[in-house]
Amino acid sequence: MAVPKNIKLNKQETLLIQWDNGKENIYPLKFLRDESPDANNKGETILWKHYSPPFKSPDKPGKYEIADIQMVGNYAIQITWKDGYDYGIYSWQILEQLGDYLALKTSLKDQ
């Protein structure tokens, strides 16, 4: 599993992660927020039963702007958004998978 060497916020538009394996991913903030890996956003599965996320309220100002990024141990980051939302821990594995998805999506769009 790759580990970030550098994490940089670019103008409240994208998050750049440079990995120790030489890869580099650029994540649009809207994409990161919409893909937040928490039960309030994605729902959860307990004992093979899926529970849908609660009804989403209207967007608040700052929904797609980052207020703070904190390390979680040696395996993840937690993003606090300017609207106060701070759920969801983005593990290195999840960030790598999301980066691979974005790279594939971009390469297919370019064809």
Image (cartoon, rainbow, N blue to C red):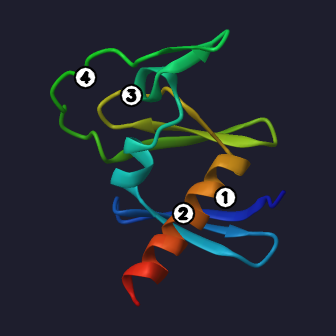
In contact (CB < 8 Å): disc 3 and disc 2: no
- The kind of residue tagged 4 is Lys
Rounded to the nearest whole Å, what is the CA distance between mark 3 and mark 1?
Answer: 22 Å
- The kind of residue tagged 3 is Tyr
Packing grade of label 3 (10 A; few <14, some 14-19, many >=20) is some
Packing grade of label 1 (10 A; few <14, some 14-19, many >=20) is many
Q: Residue at x 19, y 31 (%)?
A: 60
Query: How far across and down, in percent of the image, does residue 105 sit?
Result: 45, 71
Disc nearer the start of the sequence (1/4): 4
Report the residue marked by disc 4: 56
- The kind of residue tagged 1 is Glu
In contact (CB < 8 Å): disc 3 and disc 1: no
Q: Nearer the viewer, mark 1 or mark 2?
A: 2
Rounded to the nearest whole Å, what is the CA distance between mark 3 and mark 2?
Answer: 24 Å
Report the residue marked by disc 1: 96
Q: Which mark is residue 85?
A: 3
Rounded to the nearest whole Å, what is the CA distance between mark 1 and mark 4?
Answer: 27 Å
Q: Secondary structure at mark 3?
A: loop
Quarter assignment of residue 54: top left
